[in-house]
Image (tube, coloured by chain):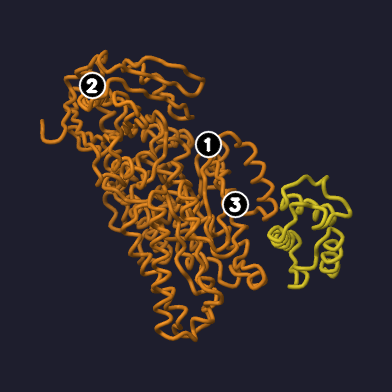
Chain colours: A orange, B yellow
Amino acid sequence: MAGLSYSEILRENALLGKSMEGTPAYTIAVLSNIVVAQLNAIFEHPLRRAGIHARVSSGDYDNIPQDSLKFREADLVIVFWEACNIRPLLQARANVMEAVEIQDLVSAVKAEIDFVLNNLSRTSLVFFNQFSSMAFNHHVIGRNNFDRICEELNAHLTAKEDACSNLFLVDVEKILASMSVSKAVDFRFFYSSKSLYSIEFFRAYADYCGAIIQSVAGKARKALIFDCDNTLWKGVLGEDGFDGIEMSARSKAGAIFEEIQQIAVELSRKGVLIGLCSKNNLDDVNHVIENHPDACLRDASIAIKRINWEDKASNLAAIARDLNIGLNSLVFIDDSDFEIERVRSGMPEVLAVRVPESLHDYPELLRKTSRLFYSGVLSKEDAERGAMYQREIERKAGISAFQNVEEYLASLQLGVSIAIDEIRDAPRLAQLTQKTNQFNLTTKRYTEADIRNFIDSRSDSVVSFSVADKFGGYGLVGLCIVCRGVDAGSATIDTLLMSCRTIGRNIELAFFDFLIPFMKDAGIEAVEATYIQTQKNNQVIDFYERVGFQTMESTQTVRNYRLELDVYQPRNLHYISIRYGNQN
Amino acid sequence: METRIKRVMASVFGIEESQIGDDSSSETIEEWDSLRQMNLILALEEEFGIRFSDEETLETLSLRQFIDVIGSKTTAG
C-alpha cells in the first residue's frame, strides 16, 4: 500500500498474519532463480489487508524445475525466472556466444519451461514472469543476443498461455516502465547475493498481480458509478445547457471526457456494470444520453441510473440493492469533495474516487482504477451483463401487478437448461465460483484449471444450468459439483451456487427436482452437503432444510446435512420448465 | 535515532524491540542472517533516506555499527 515503508509493511504484515491465524490460508509459492526474498511480505501485505490470509513460501534458490513438483498444491505459484541467471552472467555471455550455442541453450530452457508447466498443470493459478533483458539492455541500441533469447523464450511462453488455462504471464517490462529501470533495479546485491530488484519494484509487482488474486478470491469490484456534471462531461448541464456541455475530442476539455466515456463503454463491454448517480433532472440527463451527438456512453452500456436530488449515499445504497451486489462491489466517481467525503465517511465499503483537479490525470486514474474490475476471462455473460441487469430492473417493476409471487413467476415463462461436465463452460463456471457470494453454500473459489479437474474426474460431476425467461436469457448462472464417495452409493455436494441475478424465482427448487433423479440414475442412494457461513450467504442458511435434508452435527458456522434420495419430495413447479440434453 | 533503528531491526527480524540490546549483533541475534542483513539495509535506507556503500552493506553487522554509520550519513543534513 502506498505510504507505508518496508519496515512498516513487515510489522503490519506480521500482525495481520497473527490475527488471521486459524483462518484458511491462500498459499503462494515463489519459485525463483534469483533472490526475491523481499517479495514475500510485500506480496502478502495488501492481500491480508483485503482480508485474504495470504501465506508466501519460497522455493530453494535456483531450483525452479525441482520446486515445480514440490509446490504444485499451492493455491498460486509464482515463477520468477530471471533471464540473466538462466546461466551465470547470461546478460554478458550471451552476446559472445555462437549461434549454435544459443540455439542449444534456448531449446534446453524451453524444455525446462515445458517440464515446469506440466508439473503445474493442475495448480489453480500460475503467474509466470515474462523474460526481460531490460534491466541490462535498456541502453543498448538495436537488439543483441540476450534480447533475442528473451524474445524467443517469450514467444514460447505466449504459445503456452493459450493452451494452459491456469497460466497468467506477468509482463515485467510494463512494471519496469511504470517506475523506470533505474529505480526498479539495485545492482548492489546482484553480484554478491543474486538479488536484482529494489523494494519499490516488488511493491509495484505486488500491486500489479494483486488485482488478479483479488478477482480469483472473489473480491473484484463489479460496478462503476459516475456522477454526471464535470465527471462524464465538462460543464454543468443545469447551467450550461444541452449545447454548453463538452464531451468530444473536438475541444481540449471535451477530449478528456470523451476518453472517460470511451473507457466506460469498454468496461461495460467487459462486464463491468456502469451506473449514473447524479443530482440533476432525470429528463435532462436522459436527453443527453439519448440525443447528444457527442455522447459515447449510451443507454445500451448503462445498467442503472439514479438521477434525482436525493442524498448520494442513499442513492448508492439503492443502486447496490437494485443490482443485487454488495456495497464493497461499487466504485463511485465524482468531482465534488463534498459528495466524495459523504460517501467515504458514510459507506467506507464503497471506493469513492475524486476526479483529479488536474483533469489531464483523469483518464490515467480511471485506467488504473479499472484494474479493480479485473475478472480474468471475458465470458459471453460478461458482455451482456449490463443489458441483463437492465431487464432485471424492468422485471422488478412488473412484480406489483400480480396478486402473488407465484403468479408473477408464472408470467415470466422461466426455463432452466442443464448441462453436465461441459468443458467449454469451464471459464464461466470458474468465474461463478469466484464471484458468487450470496447464494453460495460453501463459497469455495475455483480457477478454470480446478473446474477442468472436476470435469475430467470420473467420480465428480459438474452440473450447471442456464436460465431464460420471456425478457431474455440470464446466461449460465448455476453450478453444482457432486463428488462420489469411496462407497459407491454415497456422494457429497462440494459446491452449490447460483448467481444473484436469478435469486427469488424458485429456480433452485426446480433444479433439485432435476438433480435428485439425476443422482439416483447414477446409482447414488444418499448425498451429504454442507453450508459454510460467510458474511454474505445468510439467505441460504436453511436452504438444505427447505429441500428436505436432515441436519447432522453442526457448529455455529458450518452445518452438515444428509439426504436419503428415496425420501426426496419433488416440488413439481409448473411454471418452470427444465431441459437437459435433447429432451424437452 | 537509536530507537528508530531498533524498531526497524525488530520488524525485519520479526522479534520484539526489547530483545535488541546495546551489544546486539549478527552474532547475538539468531534471526540476523545474510538474507535479513540485506532486508535490514534496504529498510534502513528507506527509513533514513540514505544509501549504504557496498562495503557498508557487508561490514555493518551490529547495532553500534549501524548507529555510527547512519549517524555519519545524517549529521551533515
Q: Residue A468: where, in percent of width, then height?
A: 20, 34
Picture layout, residue A459 above or below residue A83: above
The one of A398 and A194 positioned closer to us in this rendering: A194
Q: Residues within 10 Å of mark 3 (few under 14, many from 20)?
A: few
Chain under label 1? A
In-image side of A145 versus B45 (left or right): left
Rendered location of residue A372, percent (x, y): 46, 49
The image shows residue A191, relative to residue A267, as above or below, that is: below
**How far across and down, in percent of the image, does residue A556 sit?**
51, 20
| Amino acid tagged 1 | Pro
Q: Residue at x 33, y 47 (%)?
A: A271
Numbered disc 1: secondary structure: loop
Q: CA distance from mark 1 to mark 2?
A: 47 Å
Instruction: Give left or right: position of A268 versus A348.
Output: left
CB under 8 Å between discs 1 and 2 = no
Whether labels 1 and 2 share one chain = yes
Residue of label 2: A401
Query: Which mark is first along the chain, 2 or 3?
Result: 3
Residue occupying the point 45% across, 82% down: A145
Residue that carries the numbered disc 3 in the rendered image? A1
Of the numbered discs 3 and 1, the one sitting upstream in the chain is 3
Label 2: few (<14), some (14–19) or many (≥20) C-alpha neighbours in 10 Å: few
Tag 3–tag 1 contact (CB < 8 Å)? no
**Which numbered dot is residue A24?**
1
Residue type of the residue flagged with mark 3: Met
Query: Distance of mark 3 from mark 2, alpha carbons?
Result: 51 Å
